[in-house]
Amino acid sequence: MAKEEVEKPKYGINELAQAMGSKPHLVRIKLRRKGIEREEGKTYGWNTKTELEDVIKLLNAEAKSPTEKKAKAEKKAPAAKKTITKKAA
């Protein structure tokens, strides 16, 4: 039996990671969390630049800028401080 030639997609994880300025393993984690399916259950891949850009937009939609994270942290109520009292001798 001859193996069937499977056409590889033009854009893969490495191109996606490079476009996002990230590492491939971190991009795979993001893809899994978003529920993006792998091609034929084996690899992530996209055949057109438009498909790749759509995935980038989807993954970046949830990413927050550092200033948004800082503003959210400032809105949280500060933790109660424990006061220390010294007993008179």
Image (cartoon, rainbow, N blue to C red):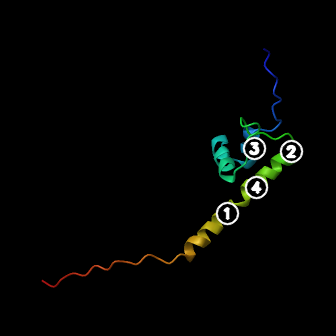
Q: What whole-number distance in Å separates the C-alpha atoms at marks 1 and 2?
A: 25 Å
Expressed as whole percent of the image width and height from the top left, the position of residue 48 reads: 87, 42
Mark 1 residue type: Ser
Q: Label 4 crowding class (10 Å Cα cut-off): few <14, some 14-19, many 20+?
A: some
Q: Earlier in the sequence, mark 3 or mark 4?
A: 3
Expressed as whole percent of the image width and height from the top left, the position of residue 10 reads: 83, 36
Expressed as whole percent of the image width and height from the top left, the position of residue 86 reads: 21, 81
Q: Earlier in the sequence, mark 4 or mark 1?
A: 4
Residue plotted at (61% across, 72% down): 71
Mark 4 residue type: Leu
Residue plotted at (69% across, 50% down): 35
Please say if 23 is above or below 84: above
Q: Which mark is residue 16?
A: 3
Mark 2 touches mark 3? (CB < 8 Å): no
Q: What whole-number distance in Å separates the C-alpha atoms at marks 4 and 1?
A: 15 Å
Of discs 4 and 2, which sits in the foreground? 4
Q: Which mark is residue 49?
A: 2
Residue plotted at (69% across, 48% down): 31
Mark 1 touches mark 2? (CB < 8 Å): no
Q: What whole-number distance in Å separates the C-alpha atoms at marks 4 and 2?
A: 14 Å
Q: Earlier in the sequence, mark 4 or mark 2?
A: 2
Expressed as whole percent of the image width and height from the top left, the position of residue 72 reads: 60, 72
Q: What whole-number distance in Å separates the C-alpha atoms at marks 2 and 3?
A: 10 Å
Q: What whole-number distance in Å separates the C-alpha atoms at marks 3 and 4?
A: 12 Å
Q: What whole-number distance in Å separates the C-alpha atoms at marks 1 and 3?
A: 20 Å
Residue beneath disc 1: 65
Residue beneath disc 4: 58
Residue plotted at (75% across, 44% down): 16
